[in-house]
Image: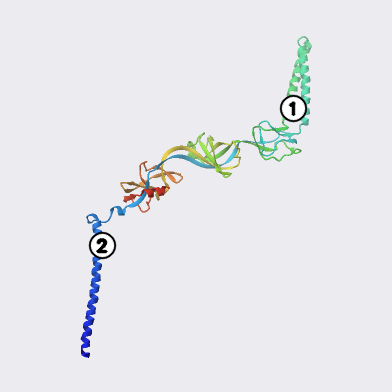
Amino acid sequence: MLASDGPKRGIAAVSKLIKILLGICLVAAFAFGGIWSARQLTAQDTPDGGEQGGGSDATQVGVASPLERRIEDDLSGVGTLRAIRAVDLMPAASGRVTEVRISSGDTVSEGDILIQLDDRAERAALNDAEATLAETRSDFQRFEELSESNTAAEARVEETRAAFRRAEAAVSSARAALEDRTITAPFDGTVGLLDIEPGSFLAQDAIVTTLFDLSAVEIRLSLPERYFDQVEAGQTVTMTTPAYPDATFEGTVAVRASQIELATRSFDVRARIDNPERRLVGGMFANARLVLDTYDALAIPDDAIISEGLTTFVYTVTDDTAARTKITPGRSIGALTEVREGLAEDDRVVIAGWDDLSDGDAVEIDEDYGQEATN
């Protein structure tokens, strides 16, 4: 019995090894069959046994045609506002203030009396001059009548005439001196700051206050020389100021300087802006935009434009094929950019999905994709 156990164990080991080898072969066969079947299915899906391609390789893109927009060729600048007219008010002669009829910020009309100086001496001088004038007039008239019948009176006519003329001049001078004791408004306007009280003594030519005509304001701009030929009177100017951040004011170019400043190679422009509500005042900082010209042009979304170095281009689609198209961009219009050269109205421009595109790639247009990109 013990002698026969050895052969039996050997046979069992061999049998077990054979089973293991058969299992490995079966697994390999199944794996090979699966791979072969997959290749057959793939080959059936590819026409004429060729490589995969067609629709599955096309890139989905959104497209849109260029939009027509009205473009304003404009020029921006900054400046400071000034009242259309402003004058410092000062007395023509020194004297003591007897009456102040205005306050800071008052609106006055041309000819209104603003400040009165002591004029008692001037009134007395005028009265005296007028009395002398009346006397010399009477003498002149009397001797003129006598000269017609009295030869002796003829010599006195010229004498009394000269005295009469001197008296007239004295009255005019006295009236002027009296008027110099009054400060009046030279035009309709708004009074500036005033620090004068009755009893104050004013020296001749001392500035009392400033009168501003704010019916319109003026903005002065300094523009580069290259725009000289494009700027002319009558062009529209729009303006904003930090004082009214939500408001835009409009005016026109009033005058352009007749020469270029050598130091800066720039020229001055003055624009007038009507100010009926008196909201604008002198000294305000202003951002101005001068419209040089208006024209119609094509525009595309900013997201469609690609820049590489000095080259700017877009992708256009023809027969489901992308083409790299060089363009010349112009001005920005919100989320759009003007295209000056390179596109036609009926071109279809890729506005979304161009990230992985190359010239000549097949594309599939997704209308929803394009609408999402333009919203």
Q: What SS does tag 1 mark?
A: helix
Percent of width and height locating residue 242: 57, 45
Percent of width and height locating residue 295: 43, 37
The one nearer the camera, 76 or 37, is 37
Q: Is residue 142 above or below residue 45?
A: above
Q: Residues within 10 Å of mark 1 (few under 14, many from 20)?
A: many
Q: Classify residue 24 as left or right of residue 354.
A: left
Q: What SS does tag 2 mark?
A: helix
Q: Residue at x 20, y 86 (%)?
A: 7
The residue under label 2 is 38
Q: Residue at x 22, y 84 (%)?
A: 10
At label 1, the amino acid type is Ala
Q: Residue at x 52, y 38 (%)?
A: 237
Q: Is residue 305 visible?
A: no
Residue 174: image tag: 1
Q: Classify residue 106 as left or right of residue 348.
A: right
Percent of width and height locating residue 322: 33, 49
